[in-house]
Amino acid sequence: MEYKTILLPVALTKNQTLHIQDVLNQLADEGWELVSLQAQQRAGGIDGNLTVLKRNKLA
């Protein structure tokens, strides 16, 4: 098993939501499965969403 983390943007509009969907679908096509998604915050607000993905190691 291998893991990958990416920081996805915060979706404030429908277009941003569709962009995130496209990114996740592309990763799924590469064999990645979403494990978790957690908002990353600091004093000024939310920076993005830390996304953890996994897939079986490629031979």
Image: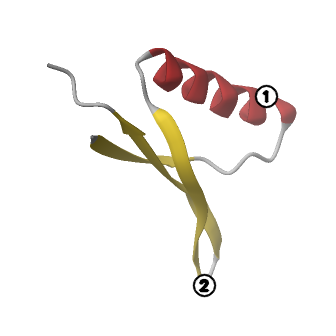
Q: Position of residue 3 (x, y in %)?
A: 32, 45
Residue at 63 percent of width and 22 percent of height: 22
Q: Horizontally, is 32 left or right of 17 in the view? A: left
Q: Position of residue 58 (x, y in %)?
A: 21, 22
Query: Which of the two labelled residues, at mark 1 and mark 2, occupies the earlier sequence position?
Result: 1
Residue at 50 percent of width and 35 percent of height: 33
Please name whichever residue, 10 or 4, is drawn nearer the observer in this view of the structure: 4
Which quadrant of the figure contains the C terminus?
top left
- As drawn, the label of residue 43 is 2
Distance from disc 1 to disc 2, alpha carbons, whole Å, reads: 26 Å
Q: Relative to 46, is 4 above or below?
A: above
Q: Could you classify mark 2 by the number of other residues whose Cα lies within 10 Å: few (under 14), some (14-19), or many (20 or more)?
A: few
Q: Could you classify mark 1 by the number of other residues whose Cα lies within 10 Å: few (under 14), some (14-19), or many (20 or more)?
A: few
What amino acid type should be assigned to the residue bearing mark 2?
Answer: Ala
Query: Disc 1 vs disc 2: Cβ atoms closer than 8 Å?
Result: no
Circle 2 SS class: loop
What amino acid type should be assigned to the residue bearing mark 1?
Answer: Asn
Residue lying furthest top: 29
Q: In the picture, residue 17 is in which quadrant?
A: top right
Please name whichever residue, 27 or 1, is drawn nearer the observer in this view of the structure: 1
Which quadrant of the figure contains the N terminus?
top left
Q: In the picture, residue 13 is in which quadrant?
A: top right
Residue at 23 percent of width and 30 percent of height: 57
- As drawn, the label of residue 15 is 1
Q: How is the model colour-coded?
A: secondary structure
Q: Position of residue 32 (x, y in %)?
A: 44, 30
